[in-house]
Image: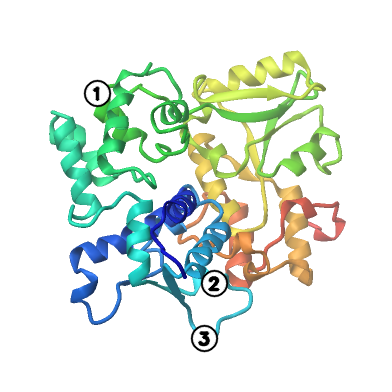
C-alpha cells in the first residue's frame, strides 16, 4: 500500500474528517495513543462505537446522517488506517454502527490521522491543547470560560489554537447576527458549529442577547376571519392536505391550521415575536391571519390548540412539550382515533420496520392530555405499533 502519509492521502482523510462523527472518532483514537504510545502497547488502541463512548456519532444534531458517516468510516478502514470489528452476527434490520463495533487504530493509520486532524505527536491530548489555548487567548474568569472549557470545538484539520483564535474573532462580530451566521463568519464557513453552544457563547462575550437563534419558521393557513381553534400539525404533507381542504374533521370556518415541523415547533421561543416567523398560505384570509398573529405572540391570551402528529412515541413527546408552550393543547381526536383504529386492525408498523423510528424511547410519564394518556400511550406501550399521520383517512368505525 504505498506511503500512507503523502499529501494527497492526508488531504483525502482531512475531507472525510469534515464529518463531525468522523472527526470525533479520529480524535478519540489519537487521544488514546497520546496517553500510551503504540510502542508501549501489547495491542493497538481501540474504542467502541456506542452512545457513552462516542456520543457525537449518536447525536443527530451533530451527525444527522449516520449512515453516511459510517460509510466514511468504512472508507477509512479500506485504506488500512483503521479496522472495524463488529459482531459476527446481528439482525438484518439493525444498522452496523448500532451493533457497538470496535474501531482499531493501525500503526500506519496513526501518522495519516495525525496529519489530517493536525495532531502532531508529543503535544499532549487535544483537550489539553484546547485548555492551554483558551487560557492563553482569553483573560477571563472561569465562569466566562467554563462553557467552552467543557464544550470544546473540534474542526478537522484545524489545531486547537487555530480554533480558539476564530472563537476570539466572534467577539468582534455584530452581536445581532444569528447564531449560524456568526458561526459561518468565524469558523471557515461552517454554520452549524455553535448550534449547541449559544449559552456558552453568550457567557464568553458577556451579552445574554448576543447571536440569537434564528426564528422558527411556521406555515399557517387561516381560511376564514372567525376561526375558533388552531390545529398544530407535525408533518408537512398533512398540512398541505389541510390547506387543500382534504383533511377530514377540519372545519375551515372554525379552525386555523399550522405546520410546526416536529420538535422545533415545541421550542419555548415559538410564541415570542422575535422567535417565530409566520408565513401564511395564499388562500388565507387577511383578517384571520392578523387575529392569529396577535393571539399567537400574546402569551397570556388563551388559545384553543390541538395537536396532530404520527401515532408514535416521538409525537407524544412533542405533545407534552407543546403543552408548555400552549397550555391545554390536546391530541386531535378525529385524526388520532382514525390512526388508532388502523393500528388496532393490524395496519401499523413496528419501530424496526422504519429506520427513522428505531431509536424512539418509551416515555416514562404522560403528556397531560387525558385522551393521549388513557388511549394512545397505553396502546403504544402495549403494542409498539406505529402509524404515520399521512395515513389519516375518514374512519366511521371508531364509533366514539
Question: Nearest the camera: 303 or 81?
Answer: 81
Q: Position of residue 391 (x, y in %)?
A: 79, 55
Q: Please report the residue visible at 42 percent of the width from the left and 51 percent of the height from the top.
A: 7
Whichever of labels 1 and 2 marks the residue nearer the N terminus, that label is: 2
How packed is label 2: few (under 14 Cα within 10 Å), some, or many (20 or more)? Answer: some
Q: Position of residue 24 (x, y in %)?
A: 38, 55
Question: Which residue in the protein does label 2 denote?
Answer: 96
Q: CA distance from mark 1 to mark 3?
A: 53 Å
Question: Nearest the camera: 133 or 305?
Answer: 133
How packed is label 1: few (under 14 Cα within 10 Å), some, or many (20 or more)? Answer: few
Q: Is 7 on the left-hand or right-hand side of 67?
A: left
Q: Is residue 15 positioned above or below 383 on the image?
A: above
Question: Which residue in the protein does label 3 denote?
Answer: 88
Q: Is residue 258 visible?
A: yes
Q: Position of residue 180 (x, y in %)?
A: 46, 30
Q: Helix, strand or loop at disc 2?
A: helix
Q: Is residue 101 visible?
A: no
Residue that lies at the very extreme toward the front in this rendered image: 2
Comparing marks 1 and 2, which lies closer to the viewer? 2
Whichever of labels 3 and 2 marks the residue nearer the N terminus, that label is: 3
Image quarter where the C terminus lies is: bottom right
Q: Is residue 359 positioned above or below 139 on the image?
A: below
Question: Which residue in the protein does label 1 denote?
Answer: 206
Q: CA distance from mark 1 to mark 2?
A: 44 Å
Whichever of labels 1 and 3 marks the residue nearer the N terminus, that label is: 3
Q: Position of residue 196 (x, y in %)?
A: 39, 41
Amino acid at each position: 500500500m504505498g506511503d500512507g502519509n503523502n499529501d494527497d492521502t492526508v488531504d483525502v482523510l482531512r475531507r472525510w474528517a469534515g464529518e463531525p462523527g468522523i472527526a470525533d472518532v479520529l480524535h478519540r483514537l489519537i487521544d488514546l495513543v497520546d496517553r500510551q504510545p503504540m510502542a508501549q502497547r501489547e495491542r493497538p488502541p481501540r474504542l467502541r462505537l456506542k452512545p457513552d463512548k462516542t456520543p457525537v456519532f449518536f447525536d443527530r444534531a451533530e451527525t444527522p446522517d449516520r449512515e453516511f458517516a459510517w460509510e466514511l468510516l468504512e472508507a477509512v478502514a479500506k485504506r488500512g488506517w483503521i479496522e472495524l470489528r463488529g459482531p459476527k452476527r446481528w439482525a438484518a434490520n439493525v444498522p452496523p454502527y448500532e451493533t457497538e463495533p470496535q474501531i482499531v487504530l493501525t500503526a500506519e493509520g496513526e501518522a495519516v490521522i495525525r496529519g489530517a486532524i493536525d495532531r502532531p505527536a508529543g503535544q499532549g491530548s487535544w483537550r489539553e491543547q484546547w485548555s492551554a489555548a483558551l487560557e492563553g487567548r482569553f483573560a477571563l474568569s472561569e465562569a466566562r470560560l467554563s462553557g467552552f472549557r467543557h464544550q470544546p470545538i473540534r474542526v478537522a484539520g484545524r489545531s486547537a489554537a487555530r480554533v480558539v483564535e476564530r472563537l476570539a474573532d466572534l467577539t468582534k462580530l455584530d452581536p445581532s447576527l444569528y447564531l449560524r451566521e456568526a458561526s459561518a463568519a468565524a469558523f471557515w464557513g461552517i454554520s452549524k458549529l455553535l448550534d449547541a453552544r449559544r449559552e456558552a457563547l453568550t457567557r464568553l462575550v458577556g451579552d445574554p442577547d448576543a447571536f440569537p437563534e434564528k426564528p422558527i419558521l411556521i406555515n399557517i393557513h387561516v381560511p376564514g376571519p372567525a376561526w375558533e381553534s388552531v390545529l398544530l400539525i407535525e408533518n408537512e404533507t398533512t398540512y398541505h392536505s389541510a390547506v387543500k381542504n382534504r383533511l377530514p374533521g377540519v372545519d375551515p370556518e372554525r379552525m386555523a391550521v399550522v405546520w410546526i415541523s416536529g420538535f422545533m415547533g415545541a421550542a419555548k421561543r415559538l410564541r415570542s415575536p422575535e422567535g417565530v416567523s409566520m408565513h401564511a398560505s395564499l388562500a388565507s384570509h387577511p383578517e384571520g391571519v392578523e387575529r392569529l398573529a396577535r393571539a399567537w405572540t400574546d402569551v397570556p391570551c388563551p388559545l384553543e390548540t390541538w395537536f396532530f402528529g404520527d401515532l408514535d412515541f416521538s409525537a407524544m413527546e412533542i405533545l407534552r412539550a407543546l403543552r408548555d408552550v400552549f397550555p391545554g393543547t390536546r391530541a386531535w381526536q378525529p385524526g388520532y382515533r382514525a390512526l388508532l383504529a388502523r393500528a388496532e386492525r393490524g395496519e401499523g408498523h413496528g419501530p424496526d420496520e422504519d429506520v427513522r423510528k428505531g431509536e424512539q424511547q418509551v416515555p416514562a410519564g404522560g403528556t397531560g392530555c387525558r385522551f393521549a394518556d388513557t388511549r394512545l400511550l397505553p396502546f403504544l406501550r402495549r403494542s409498539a405499533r406505529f402509524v404515520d399521520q399521512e395515513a389519516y383517512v375518514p374512519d366511521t368505525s371508531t364509533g366514539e
